[in-house]
Image (spheres, grey):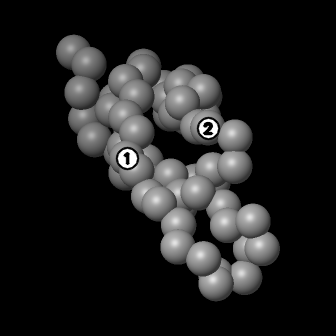
Amino acid sequence: MILHAHVETIPPDNWGTRETQVREVTAEAPTYDEGMAALRAQFDQGERLITVRVAEGMA
């Protein structure tokens, strides 16, 4: 399966008063748990997960 996630930078004050950046990361793995671990490995410090989308893949 292929997992697509949107990751957002956490603002320093966490009040939403500063602009954040969102980027998409993708991982392919045989199971959801392995896919989530692969996604999290791509997060930079100070980022948080905001969405996950699962697509079929891997034959």
- Give the answer, above or below, for where 45 lies relative to 38: below
Q: From where the camera sits, is residue 51 visible?
A: no
The amino acid type of the residue labelled 1 equals Glu
Q: Residue at x 37, y 47 (%)?
A: 24
Q: Which mark is residue 6?
A: none
For the residue carrying disc 2, how many other residues have a C-alpha within 10 Å: few (<14), some (14-19), or many (20+)?
Answer: few
Q: Which mark is residue 44?
A: 2
Which of the image's four quarters has the C terminus? Answer: top left
- Give the answer, above or below, for where 17 lies relative to 56: below
- Give the answer, above or below, for where 1 lies relative to 3: above
Where in the figure is residue 4, as x and y percent of width and height?
Answer: 37, 43
Where in the figure is residue 51, as x and y percent of width and height?
Answer: 47, 59
Residue 8 falls left or right of residue 22: right
Q: Residue at x 58, y 37 (%)?
A: 43
> Label 1: which residue?
24
How much space separates mark 1 and mark 2, taking CA atoms? Answer: 12 Å
Residue nearest the observer in this picture, 45 or 35: 45
Q: Residue at x 42, y 21 (%)?
A: 29
Q: Residue furthest top?
A: 59
Residue 14, quarter of picture: bottom right
Residue at disc 1, secondary structure: strand
Observer-side mark, 1 or 2, equals 2
Q: Residue at x 40, y 28 (%)?
A: 27
Residue nearest the observer in this picture, 42 or 29: 42
Q: From where the camera sits, is residue 10 visible?
A: yes
Residue 43 falls left or right of residue 32: right
Q: Earlier in the sequence, mark 1 or mark 2?
A: 1
Residue at disc 2, secondary structure: loop
Residue nearest the observer in this picture, 51 or 59: 51
The amino acid type of the residue labelled 2 equals Asp
Residue 41, quarter of picture: top right
